[in-house]
Image: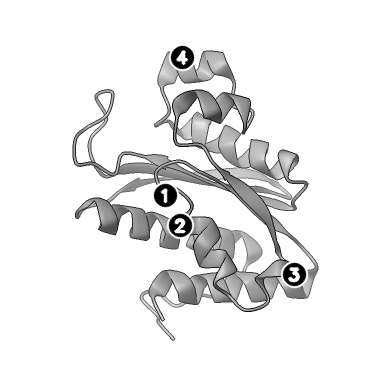
Amino acid sequence: MSEGASVAATVVAALAKAGQTVAAAESLTGGLVSSTLVDVPGASAAFRGGVVVYATELKATLAGVSAPLLAERGPVDPDVAAALAEGVRARCDADWGLATTGVAGPEPQDGKPVGLVYVAVSGPGGTEVRRLDLGGDRVLIRVSTVTEVLRLLADRLRVSVLPGATA
């Protein structure tokens, strides 16, 4: 089991136990967060759904990110990540919203370097964003992003996930 899958199993179990739900708005991960969550047996007890908003304009139309914010800052921005998490949480009627946005490469985007990623979790108590500066190729950046957004959710749920642990 990969590290991301292990973290996913932990958060799905914690959410199900608490009777809470989660949804995901994904840009650079292109559905990997959702896929990783639904790979967990029993995920339907906690996972509501999500949106893949790869194109910038879809971040506004499907996830509710302010068009002026996108125009001013572009899609790779901490406030955009926060808005994605908040938007998917509201649109999917979930207790928690997850978001991923960044540059997976192979080229920089809008002056932002490859490996610059923002992940966000919105839930009871507000929204938290983490900046990640990831190395590696496109696949590694995307896989690492999945693990990190799920770790952020685990932190917010106050469930323990050992660093680097795999099952």
Amino acid type at mark 4: Ala
Mark 2 or mark 4, earlier in chain: 2
Q: Position of residue 32 (x, y in %)?
A: 45, 57
- The nearer-to-camera label among 2 and 4 is 2
Identify whether 76 is placed above or below 26: above
Residue at mark 2: 32
Q: Position of residue 106 (x, y in %)?
A: 19, 41
- Check contact, mark 2 vs mark 4: CB within 8 A: no
What residue occupies the far bottom of the structure in this picture?
A: 167
Q: Nearer the viewer, residue 20 or 58?
A: 58
Residue drawn at (56%, 65%) of the image: 37
Residue at mark 4: 71
Image side of residue 70 versus residue 111, left or right: right
Amino acid type at mark 3: Ala
Mark 1 or mark 4, earlier in chain: 1
Q: Position of residue 9 (x, y in %)?
A: 56, 76
Residue drawn at (57%, 59%) of the image: 153
Residue at mark 3: 45
In terms of image quadrants, where is residue 75? top left
Identify the disc placed on residue 29: 1
In terms of image quadrants, where is residue 10? bottom right
